[in-house]
Image: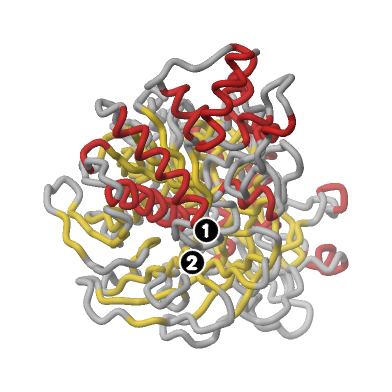
Amino acid sequence: MMRAKFICLLGAVALLAACETTPGKDKSESTTTTTTMVDPGALGGAGVGGVGAAGMAAPGTKADFEVNVGDRVLFLSDSSEISPEARAILARQADWLKRYANVQVMIEGHCDERGTREYNIGLGDRRAAAVKNYLIALGIEPYRIDTTSFGKEKPLVLGSDETSWSQNRRGMTTVR
Amino acid sequence: MSAVFPTFRRLSGAGLVLALGLALGLGGAGPLAGPARAELRIDITRGTVEPIPIAINAFAVGGAGLGDTGRAIAGVIAADLERSGLFSPLAAGQFPPSADSVPPAWGPWRDRSVQAVVTGALAVEADGRLRAEFRLWDIFATQQLAGLAYHSTPANWRRMGHIIADAIYQRITGEGGYFDTRIVYVAENGPPDKRMKRLAIMDQDGENHRFLTDGRTMVLTPRFSPSMQQITYLAFVNDKPQVYLFDLESGANRLVGTFPGIAFAPRFSPDGRRLVFSLGTAGHTNIHSLEIGGTRTVQLTSGGAIDTAPSYAPDGRQIAFESDRGGTQQIYVMNADGSAPRRISFGDGRYGSPLWSPRGDLIAFTKIAGGRFSIGVVRPDGSGERILTSAYHVEGPTWAPNGRVLMYFRELPTAGGRARSAGLYSIDVTGRNERRLVTPMDASDPAWSPLNP
């Protein structure tokens, strides 16, 4: 318990929503979720919930990245602009990638369903490129970052409303 | 996700050998009762058309082993003609006595307001080939309109039915038919988080359905070659979109090339020798073309926009495509060498997935405006924009080879955890006769083949 609290204190600077789901946690340490963090409940987020339950993810691993850093940024409709919230998450990603200098990542661009199939593959590619360029600007070597696009073909949240769509317009950074 | 190449099963190749055009002489006009009327004709571009009442007799069968095929082939013809929205086949129970007499008994058919009658015969000949002949009769003009005979292997009786339906359609409308064609599309099923998408092909009436891939690799946007038995499509391999070429006759399936970045939205040139497609690198998507089997690509658009969904005009001299270079998705037309791009969509909304009609007179598109999707057509100079259908989500028009019918897919809004449900629909270029196609599971991304060779 003490250990979980300690990790969460450290994490509170960088990570927000994960602490909220740690069971038995002191509410006063809860930090507000920003609009860029997906509600883990909507995803059945096993990774996030696992922090408190199973102990910490090993540092430098894929799970560590997903759980403690945050692997996704969201976009406005038809846009590939990196928002202020996204910049904060990408700054954490860059820090982590500098700490674990051997890790390669793939950035996937995704779109919501309210567009045509071909254009959305292009838009997802544009979003992935925007994330990559931001990480490069923060000092990550380009050869460590690959990009692709899934267009609207792999929605995270299934629903026909803006809440669902907003969570599907995303750039996912995946540790390889 | 492991990178597994899609596996194909070879289509069992029943090569259809047609001996076309054995025109059958007039079966003999019966005694005329009064002045002969003008020949039976439909103008299918008119606003509203009353379906022509037509009676299709079961084909007489001769020779061993044909069983119920005479009735079945009449059923294929009747279903094709009915599906076109231009014909209203009479139920067999309402036929007069001696319905299949040659020539027809004009009076009893006229009494039932039938305007056209079809009689036919099937026979297995000494060499084992199937012979199918038909005659089309104009009841009011009391004359034979058409009579043709065909030969093929007995297994091809369905195709012969479609070819006969095309001949009837052509004789009465003056337009080429579209029934002897196939549809390739993306079949979708499975739970929402493990959605499987695989290529499938079927006759345009839904028969002879088979899967072309096994679903282990996600596949999208299959397109038919206008000249050859080939399909191009997009597959995600190692998580990246790549363009493939599949040969329906040989079963060969191969990557079209290895490109830096992602390759998608492929289409064939009219002669089937080139592919035009989008290449995405560093977030810019431009249109390229290549000669199939060659190693060089030609870059046709440049700049930082998303240029995609390229589509050749049937004369091969121009390419329609969509681009957001002006701020929002709009339709552009350029010369086939990439010169002189000009915008042709100016309505209120965003425009995508342009597809040039095989007749060259119209470009179909998907339009997004006010939160709704529409399928529409416009002339290549940008004039005469016309919407055919609107819904929560319709997308991806494809043309029948006669340029008179379109097919597209429709998706329903999803609610809480249910995967998107999607189906194929066809509609006339006049906006009439919208029909759902029956598919074994959810379906999207249809592409209409040319007339079967």
Q: On the picture, is B198 further left or further right than B376?
A: left
Q: Residue at x 57, y 40 (%)?
A: B122
Q: Do we see residue B338 in this rendering?
A: yes
Which class describes the residues within 10 Å of circle 1: few (<14), some (14-19), or many (20+)? many
Residue B9 lies, with reference to residue A77, above or below; the image says above
Discs 1, 2 touching: Cβ within 8 Å: yes
**Which residue is identified by label 2?**
B352
In the rendered image, residue A64, in percent from the top left (x then y), is placed at 46, 23
Q: How is the image coloured?
A: secondary structure
In the rendered image, residue A92, in percent from the top left (x then y), is placed at 42, 39
Q: Which element carries disc 2, helix, strand or loop?
A: strand
Q: On the picture, is B246 further left or further right than B438?
A: left
Front-most of residues B410 and B91: B410
**Which residue is identified by label 1?**
A116
Front-most of residues A121 and B209: A121
Q: Residue at x 23, y 72 (%)?
A: B338
Q: On the picture, is A162 further left or further right than A76?
A: right
Mark 2 is on which residue type? Gly
Mark 2 chain: B
In the rendered image, residue B408, in percent from the top left (x then y), is placed at 58, 57
Q: On the picture, is A99 further left or further right than B202?
A: left
Q: State the mark number for residue B393.
A: none
Residue B328 lies, with reference to residue B10, above or below; the image says below
In the rendered image, residue B233, in percent from the top left (x then y), is placed at 38, 44
Mark 1 is on which residue type? Thr
